[in-house]
Image (cartoon, rainbow, N blue to C red):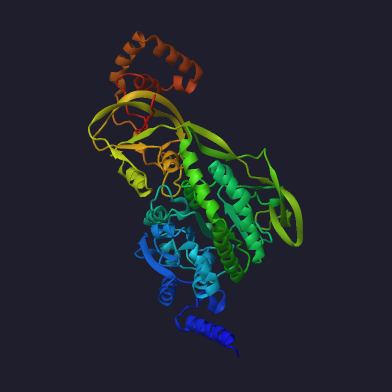
Amino acid sequence: MSNFIFAITLFFIFSLSEIHSQSLLTPFEKNNKTTTTYEECISFYKNLEKTSKLVKVIEAGPSDVGYPIHTIVLSSHNDFTAEKSRKSGKTILLINNGIHPGEPEGIDASMLYAREMVTDGNKSKLLDQITIVIIPIYNVGGSLNRNSFSRVNQNGPSEYGFRGNAQNLDLNRDFIKCDSKNAETFTHIFQNWDPDVFVDTHCTDGADYPYLMTLITSQRHKLQKQLGDFVYSHFVPAFYDKMKSEGLEAFPYINSDGDPSTGISDLMDSPRFSSGYAALFHCIPFISESHMLKPYDARVNAQKILLRSLALVCVDYKKQIFEIRKTAKENYRKQTDVTINWKIQKQTTDSILFHGYEVEKMTSEVTGLERIKYNRNKPYEKKIPFFDYGKPDLKIQRPDVYIVPAAYQQVIERLKWNGVQMQMLSKDSMIKAEYYRIIDYKSPAKPYENHFLHSQIELETIKTKRKFFKGDYLIKTDQPSMRYIIETLEPQAPDSYFAWNFFDAMLQRKEYFSNYLFEDIATELLQNNYTLREDFEKRKRDDPAFAKDPDAMLNFIYSRSKFSEPGYMIYPVARWREE
Ligand SMILES: [Zn+2]
């Protein structure tokens, strides 16, 4: 045996024995069917930390249950902070696992990947160029709530966590409203690291097809233009190629109405979702979705290949990523008209070569109605429509400054967590600015994720003076968090704080009138105000129900009188623009 071979053999034996002796085997590897528990997962990473200088386990903050959320940082030269990593010129990749703990393959895959990265000398070299931050299990409460049945359509593992967290929230709708401690902790992690690239690992529901892995890339047209062009023209094709070279043929996420051959559609990942949230900060976001009907070990392996490929592409494109993110941040801030909502167009289609199973229709034995089945014996390969154009649907003129009353503490708190720079008013002031009057909005009859999310919000802009107080907040839009500020403070943005009920109290009157007393005042008002009288008569002619409803008619007059409270239906955040 030559010295070289001896050294290699020794290294190999040492590595393996190290893996065994230090409990570096993951629960998954014991039978390829088991997913780790929270306790096993954290103790695995702590053992890994003991064996390697390339790992740091950090308690990042609380979750809604009594156990913390961790981050596992993989980097060389002690670059375990964002500052050190940036200083060393490293790309920063953030991996989030177990947001839906019933879809745990990313949790197990990350453990295997982290071990591979720090025990395989060849692979460890990559950590000179990239810092990998892993959230091992994000939904800690859901992960502790293990069962074997809540993923009825999924092929294993034998036991797994539950989708809802300790408050029964779907954390993948919580990134803006932050009802959970988990989301608050995530915000701190994300803002601290400002990752260049982000991936959130999941397992699908829905259609059957041969692909083991599908990928959601944050919607192209929603990304800042140069960033979207770079991601879709360079980064994503390289990512698919890298996975293919590692033996994994991935495909864009199959969002269809049951039969993918009629077309698949991009997801519009608004900021309540992890990828949409990351996009607010010009990060490059992905969601990996392994296929629920494939065996568990294959899914874990696919997620591991995906993570490995992603890290390699992050390093290959390191320089371009830095440049393009810088450009995206700068160019976004130059916009005066800013899009706040997009819609996927069904008129404009691309096409994409797809491998699928024929969909057969038959009569259901249960309902007696039509049902579908995917026939795995009839695979096909053909081009299918791909609806991937997200058309700007709503633009606003960006103000120079928003003014938010300090009374809205929950909003202020979230703005601060997200790194928004703000200045306090030093004295009480009457401020002439633009304000929105809420004309109409829809809210669901049943709650959605702890809220009654408003939609179809109609506004009119009024210019008036309102009083603000010492301690209220001035927020300039020209700052790095501009996109987050606009998409949370513009009421019509789909995930604005208005939509998520943070300003609901202004939608209700606090003072009112007695009909029998107001009758006489109303008579006088109509006599003395020609326009009011005309509007009132017109409304009665146009709306027969109104003309039979005394309350509605008196209210019509009251709401147009000086007696009506000035703040009713006025969104309390001012928009100030330099004239
Ligand atoms: Zn999921």
Quarter of the image where one finds residue 249: bottom right
Q: Residue furthest bottom?
A: 1
For the question of whether residue 379 can be seen, the reply is: yes
Which of 52/209 is in front?
A: 52
Which of 235/374 is in front?
A: 235
Residue in view at x 72 percent, y 50 percent? 261
Which of 537/174 is in front?
A: 174
Task: Give the answer, above or below, for where 577 lies relative to 128.
Answer: above
- Where does the N terminus fall, quadrant-wise? bottom right
For the question of whether residue 148 can be seen, the reply is: no
Q: How many marks?
A: 0
Could you tell whether 508 is left or right of 147 in the image? left
Could you tell whether 268 is left or right of 329 in the image? right
Residue in view at x 38 percent, y 51 percent? 179
Quarter of the image where one finds residue 528: top left
Expressed as whole percent of the image width and height from the top left, the position of residue 251 reads 65, 56
Expressed as whole percent of the image width and height from the top left, the position of residue 376 reads 73, 62
- Where does the C terminus fall, quadrant-wise? top left
Task: Give the answer, above or below, for where 529 lies relative to 575.
Answer: above
Expressed as whole percent of the image width and height from the top left, the position of residue 351 reads 71, 47
Task: Give the answer, above or below, for where 6 lies relative to 492.
Answer: below
Expressed as whole percent of the image width and height from the top left, the position of residue 21 reads 46, 84
